[in-house]
Amino acid sequence: MDIIKDFLSGTFKFIQDILGGIQKLLWPPQSYSWQTLIYLSVFSWLMSYWAAGFFVKNIIAFCGWLFLIAGTAWYTTDNPVVIPGTSMPVGALITGGLISLFAFGGEKNLLNPVSFVLWPTMSALITAIPEFFQGTGTTVNPQIPKPEARQKIIVLILSSMLVSCWLQVYFVVDNWAKQYPSILTDNLNNSVLVKKIALPEEPTIRKIPKNGITILDKLVPIIITQIDDQPWSKVERLLKNARTKDSQIAKLGRRVIETELAAYKERDLWRVEARVESINPKSPDVYRLSLLSIWSGPSSKKEGYYFKRSCQVEPVASASNIIGREDRRKAEIECESENSFFADSPPPQG
C-alpha cells in the first residue's frame, strides 16, 4: 500500500509541477509583461478578423504584429540563448524572422522568398542594435560601440548578408529551373551552381526536353488540317513560302508555343521553322516537309539542339482532277509518328 501511495503522490506532484510551469509561462506575473503583449496580439488578430472595412481591419492587424514582435523580443531577451559559434541570440533570429514576415510577407503568400532572404540580415541588425545604446530601465543613452564589439558587429552583419546572398542565389536558380525546365535536361556537370544528385551506378544519359516534343506534337495535327484534302495549288504555295520567317507555318508554330508554353518564360527561346525539299527530281510534286522546333537558349554545346518531324506531301493522283487548264487535285499528307532529336545546329534552308 505504501508503494502505491508513494507512486500516486509522486505522479500527482509531477502533474502539479507541469501544470504550475504552464501556468507560470502563460499567466502574466504582472500587467506589464511579455505575456500581456502576446495576448494583445492574439486579441488584435481576432478583432481584425471580425472587423469591417479595409482600413480598420489592417490597422488592427498591424497592431497585432507589433504586439507579437515586441512580446517575442521581450521574452527571448529575458531568456537569452546564443547560437553556438556566433554572438547572435536565438531571440534575435526569431524576432528577425517575425519582422521579415511582417514587413515583406504578402497577404496571400506570407512565406515568400523576400522574407527568407532578408531574415539573416534582419536578425544580425537586431543583434547589433543594443550595442549602440547603454542604460537600464527607462534610462537609455546612445553610445558608440566599444572597439572589441565593433569587430563582432561587422563580422556578424557581413556573415549574415553572405547567407542572405546565398539564399537569394538559391531562389533565383530555383526560379530558373521552373521557368526554363529545358535547361535542366542538358549536361550540367560543369555547372558551379546546379548539381544533379544521382546514384554512382546510374548512367549519365541526357534527358530529352519535353517542351520541344510538345511543340511538334501540337503543331503536326494543325499542319495536317491545313494541308490534307486541300486544293493542291493552295498547298503548293504554302510549301514554297514555308522557308520564310513570316510563313504561315512559322506563325502557326509561334501560336502553338505561346499557347502550350504559356506557363514558362522559356517560350521565347523556342522557335518553329520548316524545311521543304523535293523527294524525287522525276516527281517534282512530291515534297518532304520537315517541321523543326529549335532551342535557341543556353546549351552545353554551342550548336544547340532541335527536334524534327518529317511529313510527305503530294497531290492525289487522278486524271479526273485535271479539267482543261484548271488543277483540281487535292493534297495528301502523311507524317512520321515520332519526333527525332538532334544535338546539333538545324540544317540550312534549302
Image (cartoon, rainbow, N blue to C red):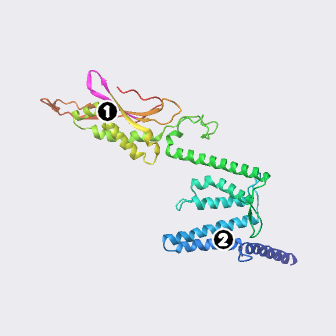
Return the disc, 1 or 2, that comes first in the chain's sequence: 2
Q: Amino acid at mark 2?
A: Ile
Q: Answer above or below: position of 163 versus 249.
A: below
| Residue 143 location, quadrant | bottom right
- Of 163 and 151, the residue lying toward us: 151
Q: Position of residue 67 (x, y in %)?
A: 64, 69
Give the class, few, some or many, for how many residues have Cα within 10 Å of label 2's Cα (few <14, many ≥20): many
Q: Amino acid at mark 1?
A: Ala
Q: Secondary structure at mark 1?
A: loop
Question: Circle 1 sits on which residue?
Answer: 242
| Residue 146 location, quadrant | bottom right
Q: Answer above or below: position of 197 versus 28.
A: above
Of labels 1 and 2, the one closer to you: 2
The residue lying furthest to the right in this view is 2
- Of 235 and 32, the residue lying toward us: 32
Q: Position of residue 322 (x, y in %)?
A: 16, 30
Q: Secondary structure at mark 2?
A: helix
The residue that appears at 21% across and 36% down in the rendered structure is 231
Question: Circle 2 sits on which residue?
Answer: 38
Tally the numbered discs: 2
Give the class, few, some or many, for how many residues have Cα within 10 Å of label 1's Cα (few <14, many ≥20): many
Q: Is residue 279 magenta?
A: yes
Residue 19 as seen in the image, left or right of residue 56: right
**What is the chief secondary structure element of the magenta stretch?**
strand
The residue that appears at 66% across and 59% down in the rendered structure is 96
The region drawn magenta spans: 277-292
Q: Position of residue 246 (x, y in %)?
A: 32, 36
| Residue 65 location, quadrant | bottom right
- Residue 324 numbered mark, or none: none
C-alpha separation, residue under disc 1 versus residue under disc 2: 70 Å
Q: Position of residue 307 (x, y in %)?
A: 43, 34
Which image quarter is the C terminus in? top left
